Amino acid sequence: MFIKSDDHETVREWISELSVLQTDLEIRVWPNVDPIEDIDFALVWDPRLGDLARYPNLKCIGSLGAGVDHILKDPGLPEGVPIVRLVDQQLIRAMSEFVLLHVLRYHRQQPQFEAAQRESRWITLPPPNTGETRLGFLGLGELGRDAAIKFRALGFDVAGWSRRLKQIDGISSYSGQDGLAALLERSHYLICLLPLTAETRGIINRRNLALLPTGAFVINCGRGGHVVDEDLLSALDSGHVAGATLDVFHVEPLSSSHPYWRHPRVTVIPHASSLTSARSGAPQMIENIRRVRAGEAPMNQVNRQAGY
Ligand SMILES: NC(=O)c1ccc[n+]([C@@H]2O[C@H](COP(=O)([O-])OP(=O)(O)OC[C@H]3O[C@@H](n4cnc5c(N)ncnc54)[C@H](OP(=O)(O)O)[C@@H]3O)[C@@H](O)[C@H]2O)c1
């Protein structure tokens, strides 16, 4: 097998965790993968376009993260080779913490209190009504579902939009274009935890933002490509969107000249909401290596057609 990431620390951690679990595993570090005939498993982040088609005996491609857009963007991917992603409980918990933190920060008027403190100003704000506060999740998969359930437990009115309708206790489920419009119209907080696919790219755009109630907040933890930046900025400037917390961007690191950095109603987080840990991710990759070598189907397979 080989591992490919541009981050040396990630590579070091993964090799260390995989090797503890399977001492005889031969791990090469891309680009030192020769002879390529030996490679049966590729564990990658942002592989070079066309590279994955070079390995004649490749049995499986593993993503070093929950998303697979960095793999599927390659038009030259080998046909018929399964792609697997990480489903990491630690990452799921961390993402829910992040979304809880940022929704509650707005909900409990923390920016206003902090601004008042900077001016030594004692202010009184009416307390928010949690039961009447409606949250809309774009994406009710591993990440969206966990966060949605946690907000429901706090008493928020929670809904989610997904490709297939869901049955989750106390959470309203929407799908399709009509469902999207209905979800947007009711959401005081819009939280994006979608994968980036041909269907979801640019979903946070002028038309969809206009459907949100005035004064809504947007939290994007999916991918930068979900947002049409100019449309979000103009919705923020007009006050239609009251605030946005953005963890992901079209180009990362975000350019120092990007208007998000200095926008008074934008919180920029440098893609830090939640990270895959080699410690918690390695066991499922070891199991997948075992499975593909035994001719069994791997876990957490991606549907190439759907794009996630
Ligand atoms: N910011 C970060 O650090 C960070 C960390 C990890 C992941 N992420 C992002 O979060 C994404 C979601 O992760 P996950 O593990 O929750 O993925 P997942 O389990 O595959 O869930 C994806 C959800 O999106 C829904 N969906 C996909 N395409 C759709 C469409 N066209 N219309 C409506 N709903 C659609 C799916 O619907 P169904 O349930 O019907 O399939 C599912 O509910 C990842 O792909 C990645 O981009 C970001």
Image (cartoon, grey):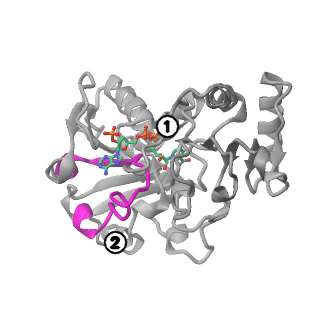
33 to the left or right of 81: right
Q: Residues within 10 Å of mark 2 (few under 14, many from 20)?
A: some
Q: What residue is at 50 percent from the left and 50 percent from the top?
A: 114
Residue 115 position (above or below residue 290): below
Q: What residue is at 82 percent from the left and 49 percent from the top?
A: 29
User: Magenta segment range?
Assistant: 184-209
Nearer-the-camera pick, 130 or 89:
89
The percent position of residue 124, horizontal first and vertical second, equals: 35, 44
Disc number for residue 231: 2
Q: Secondary structure at mark 2?
A: helix
Ligand 1 falls in quadrant: top left
The amino acid pointed to by label 1 is: Gln
Q: Secondary structure at mark 1?
A: loop
Nearer-the-camera pick, 100 or 3:
3
Mark nearest the camera among 1 and 2 is 1
The percent position of residue 66, horizontal first and vertical second, equals: 54, 42
- Whether residue 119 appears in this view of the structure is no
The amino acid pointed to by label 2 is: Asp
Q: Residues within 10 Å of mark 1 (few under 14, many from 20)?
A: some
- Which badge, 1 or 2, is on the more N-terminal residue? 2
**Residue labelled with disc 1:** 301
Mark 1–mark 2 Cα distance, whole angstroms, equals 34 Å
